[in-house]
Image (tube, coloured by chain):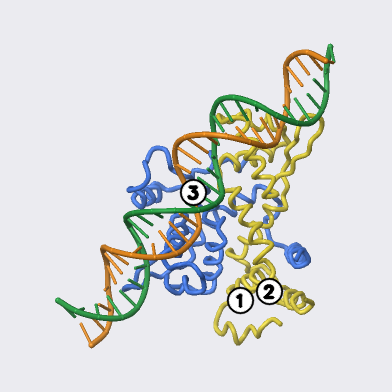
Chain colours: A yellow, B blue, C green, D orange
Amino acid sequence: MLPCIDSLYPKISPKLIFNHLVDDWMHISISRTMASSLDLIFSALADPTRRQILSMLLEDDMAVTDVAEPFEMSLAAISKHLRVLTNARLIQQERRGRVKWCKLDPDAMQEAWTWMQGFGQFDHLDLDGLEAYIERTLQSE
Amino acid sequence: MLPCIDSLYPKISPKLIFNHLVDDWMHISISRTMASSLDLIFSALADPTRRQILSMLLEDDMAVTDVAEPFEMSLAAISKHLRVLTNARLIQQERRGRVKWCKLDPDAMQEAWTWMQGFGQFDHLDLDGLEAYIERTLQSE
DNA sequence: ACTGTTTTTATTCATATTTTTATATATGCT
DNA sequence: AGCATATATAAAAATATGAATAAAAACAGT
């Protein structure tokens, strides 16, 4: 299923080959499910208030009221920011009593980070192993 | 101790600020609307068309017309997306003749990547984690 | 100078986001 | 039950975004 790499990418560096592999399985496996997911994640991260909230939650889990306290804006606005972060799966909210506790959920950040990793340096990676893995995965579909 | 707060992240050079101001002098009033660097980067990454453009540029530098070719939308829309990517410093555009060449500029991606690194122990990409991730993605279809 | 190519800008429209204020809901306490 | 606390939702206003179309601008070749 995986096309012949040598014929497709004649004189490109291994790094570029890897990058293109990443690109390929993204188009194949991610175009629907993950694309909308990355939309939500990056757009949630694009707001400075929300990034600051995430930074605060890095220290400790917090209740909604405590999250809102250092900000100038209204509690309702913060509540909506928290909903955006929850929809992006960047945080989890768990209700205990009347208090809703907010804590980081690392999965979404990892997902975005993994996507971005395709644009960085991969020199320490085992390219052959990844190729073989992707090939196995695509064939088993 | 807390490396991820935006106020601790003033990595915008005066020259860059100046460039952005010059870019938008017609539309933006200088005092209020100065989006931070991470605002621009994440909000640029939040659009699937722009992410796909970046993936295409991984393979090779491209002219604006060639970037627009695989998309359904108009060339003018793609031009606007490229401007957003340029403002976020995710790409660089260099005019040679009548053709404007677009190429990736890794610095901004690295900047966002560095910020995100504070939220996980994913400081290096281990293959097992990536494979597990790909597997999860494929299964979830 | 004329012509075709490449790219940007202007205008307009629909839709989405961010925020405030006011109101509603849910929970714990006495 | 009544009251204070914690959070969410609704309505509304300002602003931003994404896209189309049409026009303009920059440039190469003849």
**Same chain for the residues under marks 1 and 2 in the image:** yes
* Left or right, residue B95 beside residue A129: left
For the residues bearing labels 1 and 2, Cβ distance under 8 angstroms: yes
Tell me the crowding category of disc 1: few under 14, some 14 to 19, or many 20 or more residues within 10 angstroms, Cα based.
many
Which quadrant, please, contains the C terminus of chain B? bottom right
**Same chain for the residues under marks 3 and 1 in the image:** no
**Residue in the picture at 60% in, 43% down:** A51
Helix, strand or loop under label 1: helix
Which is in the foreground here, disc 3 or disc 2? 3
Residue type, label 2: Leu
Residue type, label 3: Ser
* Residue D1 x, y percent position in the rendering: 83, 15
Q: CA distance from mark 3 to mark 1?
A: 30 Å
Q: Which of the numbered marks, if any, corresponds to residue B75?
A: none
Which quadrant, please, contains the N terminus of chain B? top right
Q: CA distance from mark 1 to mark 2?
A: 9 Å
Q: Which of the numbered marks, if any, corresponds to residue A17?
A: 1
Q: Which of the numbered marks, if any, corresponds to residue B37?
A: 3
* Residue A90 x, y percent position in the rendering: 68, 47
* Residue B96 x, y percent position in the rendering: 34, 72
**Residue in the picture at 57% in, 53% down:** B112
For the residues bearing labels 3 and 2, Cβ distance under 8 angstroms: no
Q: CA distance from mark 3 to mark 2?
A: 33 Å
* Residue B67 x, y percent position in the rendering: 47, 71
Circle 2 residue: A127
For the residues bearing labels 3 and 1, Cβ distance under 8 angstroms: no
Residue type, label 1: Ile
